[in-house]
Every structure is written in structure tokens, then in C-alpha cells.
Amino acid sequence: MAEFFTAEYKWVWAALMTVALFFPVRKLIWVLSVRRNDAKSGQQSDDAEKARLRKRAGVTSALLCFLFSLAYVSQMFKDPS
């Protein structure tokens, strides 16, 4: 079991962390986007607009979570010397 906690599995850990972070980060970005859109337009967003904002939040979230996970895991498995 301890062999999974080595630098050889860095990409596996980055992928797992990306998936774990994706859903809450997407939800957060989507909620903030809808609220900002509602405040700018002065009315509630319709379903089509919410779907468009959800797609944008998904793409942004995927990129953000992947880059953060890769940086974090790389730092975690960095050679101490």
C-alpha cells in the first residue's frame, strides 16, 4: 500500500485531487457567476442563461483544479535535497 505514496504515482494523485475538487469548485464558480449576472441585469437569469454559465464554470473549474492539483502534488513529492 505504501508504494502508492511515491513520486511515480504523481499523475494519479493529481487526477484524483482534480476530480475531488472539481464539483465543489464548479458549484462555487457557477453560483457566483449567476449572482453576478443577476446583479448586472437586475433580473433573475433564465434556464438557458444558467446552463450557459454552468458550462463556462465547468471549463474554468476543470482548468483551475487541474493546475492547482498538479502544483500541489508536485510540491508534495518534491525531492527534499
Image (spheres, rainbow, N blue to C red):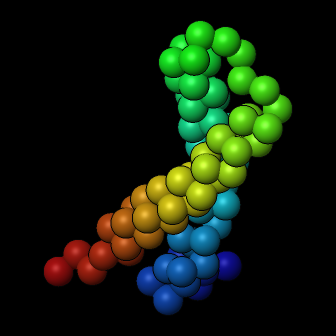
Q: Nearer the viewer, residue 42 or 57?
A: 42
Residue at (64, 66) in percent of width and height: 16
- Residue 77 in the image: state x and y as whole percent: 38, 74
Question: How many circles with numbers are drawn on the protein?
Answer: 0
Residue at (72, 35) in percent of width and height: 49
Question: Image check: 45 left or right of 80?
Answer: right
- Residue 55 in the image: state x and y as whole percent: 69, 51
- Residue 73 in the image: state x and y as whole percent: 43, 68
In the displayed structure, 66 sits above or below 9; it is above
Question: Image check: 11 left or right of 78?
Answer: right
Where residue 72 sits, quadrant-wise, is bottom left
Any part of residue 60 in sight:
yes
In the displayed structure, 40 sits above or below 78; it is above
For the C terminus, the image quarter is bottom left
Any part of residue 28 in sight:
no
For the N terminus, the image quarter is bottom right
Question: Image check: 24 left or right of 37?
Answer: right
Q: Nearer the viewer, residue 17 or 44?
A: 44
The residue sitting at the bottom extreme is: 8
Q: Nearer the viewer, residue 4 or 61?
A: 61
- Residue 8 in the image: state x and y as whole percent: 50, 89
Residue at (63, 27) in percent of width and height: 34
In the displayed structure, 62 sits above or below 81; it is above
